[in-house]
Amino acid sequence: MQNVVIVGASLAGVRAAETLRSGGFTGSITMVGDEKHMPYDRPPLSKNYLAGEWEEDRVALRKPEVIQELNLTWKLGVGATSLNIETKSITLADGSSISYDGLIIATGGVVRSLPNQPQIDGVHVLRTLDHATALRAQISEGTQAVVIGAGFIGLEAAATAHKRGAHVTVLEGLEAPLIRALGAQMGAAIGAVHERNGVTVRCGVQVASINGTSHVESITLGNGEVIPADVVIVGIGVSPATQWCESSGLTIRDGIVCDANLNAGPREVFAAGDVLRWPNELFADVESDMRVEHWTNAAEQGAHAAKNLLATFAGEELVPYVAVPFFWSDQFDARIQCLGRPSANATVDIVDGDLESGKFCAIYSVNNRLTAVLGVSKPKLVMPSRALLSQHTTRDEALAHFQKVVEAQAAASQTPPSAS
Ligand SMILES: Cc1cc2nc3c(=O)[nH]c(=O)nc-3n(C[C@H](O)[C@H](O)[C@H](O)COP(=O)(O)OP(=O)(O)OC[C@H]3O[C@@H](n4cnc5c(N)ncnc54)[C@H](O)[C@@H]3O)c2cc1C
């Protein structure tokens, strides 16, 4: 293998490039990215960067000298528009084409828009650095901000906008925030954190239109009510960025369909990050395959895909990507952490704290099998539970485990410090 192309110059792509180099690959690596920026980190875009606490240099994924050492060829600001797996070549938006011996697809997600979303000033989405820069310039003391969609990004943006002095209303079509991600009960508990901090959260409401001529002025709800708005943030999720390779012959079903090794079909094509779905052996009994839109997954899969690409050309056995997914989210002073696969249809048990205080730990089980551990400001309970999730622990075993751990933590916190 002489020549690797990585499409998608962000987290998964950079981790893939680093792993190729650390794995001894000395051939050419071309990074193709449709954004003009060098790779940067997305989580701060809805947090410290949107808050105005960090500037662009702080969100860079790697320092310039670290990037330099990787000796990569950069094609930035020019997206891939098609993939030919027979000729092993990619066409770019400027009409040029690049051929490859090995390909890693890491194109992530494309933010969704509402069907009737007007292209007027003040209406924002939040996925890229440019989006965040445009949004933060319009949020200040007294801004009337309306967030459409109570998913993680919308809620984080709501918390940050409120922190900057905006009056924030969150509109959600379902009956609670975060239902698809966490289920109704936990979603409502996180919605309550926002309410306690002064954000208005309205669930079960439909947006009929976003109004304004050159700048947004208001939102009309399905019941005719009009909500004034200086800024609207549409946070209704992302779709995998597969449009450019749809005619390639790769299997695509809400993401590039990969095998357990993150291989996308042809032996020299792998994928990593938000863009793919794969069968995760650890959860095979509850989900035949999964697509994960979180930071840790993208970072780990970038490295894993690169290792398997190197193994392919070295004639070595490929290794399946088997993982307990993890994510975090910061909203006001709530640090949300979750290991595993929470789902709306799971049985949820609160194993520590209570919903009213906004500090709690809950476990999710499906068919009496522990599938996720969710903590709100409970880091000492969530992070050590990875082993439980990788061992097919039953709900009863998990309940007993947490009871013991919580009792031990309570006893430890009551022990007076030794008088030394
Ligand atoms: C505002 C925000 C906050 C977040 N906060 C958290 C958090 O707190 N915790 C957490 O776990 N996760 C968080 N995430 C999710 C996390 O950032 C993503 O899971 C991660 O960035 C995915 O990495 P990726 O490399 O797979 O894709 P991406 O980061 O989406 O990168 C894909 C890159 O490919 C480019 N691309 C797309 N199509 C093409 C094409 N045809 N040709 C060339 N380039 C293309 C895209 O423009 C992009 O630059 C957040 C995401 C956002 C947007």
Image: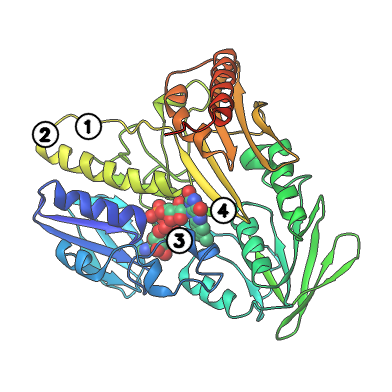
Q: Is residue 162 in sight in this rendering?
A: yes
Tell me the distance, in whole angstroms, between the alpha carbons under discs 1 and 4.
Answer: 36 Å
The answer to whether the residue labelled 4 contacts the one labelled 3, judged by CB atoms less than 8 Å apart, is no
Mark nearer the viewer, 4 or 2: 4
Tell me the distance, in whole angstroms, between the alpha carbons under discs 3 and 2.
Answer: 36 Å
The answer to whether the residue labelled 4 contacts the one labelled 2, judged by CB atoms less than 8 Å apart, is no
Lower sequence index among marks 1 and 4: 1
Question: Where is 410 relative to 96, above or below?
Answer: above
Mark 3 secondary-structure assignment: loop
Q: Residue at x 35, y 48 (%)?
A: 299
Tell me the distance, in whole angstroms, between the alpha carbons under discs 4 and 3.
Answer: 13 Å
Q: Which mark is residue 315?
A: 2
Q: Position of residue 224 (x, y in %)?
A: 91, 65
Mark 4 secondary-structure assignment: strand
Tell me the distance, in whole angstroms, between the alpha carbons under discs 3 and 1.
Answer: 30 Å
Q: Residues within 10 Å of mark 4 (few under 14, many from 20)?
A: some
Quadrant that contains the C terminus: top left
Residue labelled with disc 1: 318
Tell me the distance, in whole angstroms, between the alpha carbons under discs 4 and 2.
Answer: 43 Å
Q: Is residue 69 left or right of residue 228?
A: left
Residue labelled with disc 4: 330
Tell me the distance, in whole angstroms, between the alpha carbons under discs 1 and 2.
Answer: 9 Å
Quadrant housing residue 188: top right
Q: Is residue 114 left or right of residue 406?
A: right
The answer to whether the residue labelled 3 contacts the one labelled 1, judged by CB atoms less than 8 Å apart, is no
From the Cβ of disc 3, is ligand 1 less than 8 Å away? yes
Q: Which mark is residue 42?
A: 3
From the Cβ of disc 2, is ligand 1 less than 8 Å away? no
Quadrant housing residue 29: bottom left
Three-letter amino acid code of the residue under disc 3: Arg
In which of the image's four quarters is ligand 1 placed?
Answer: bottom left
Q: Residues within 10 Å of mark 3 (few under 14, many from 20)?
A: many
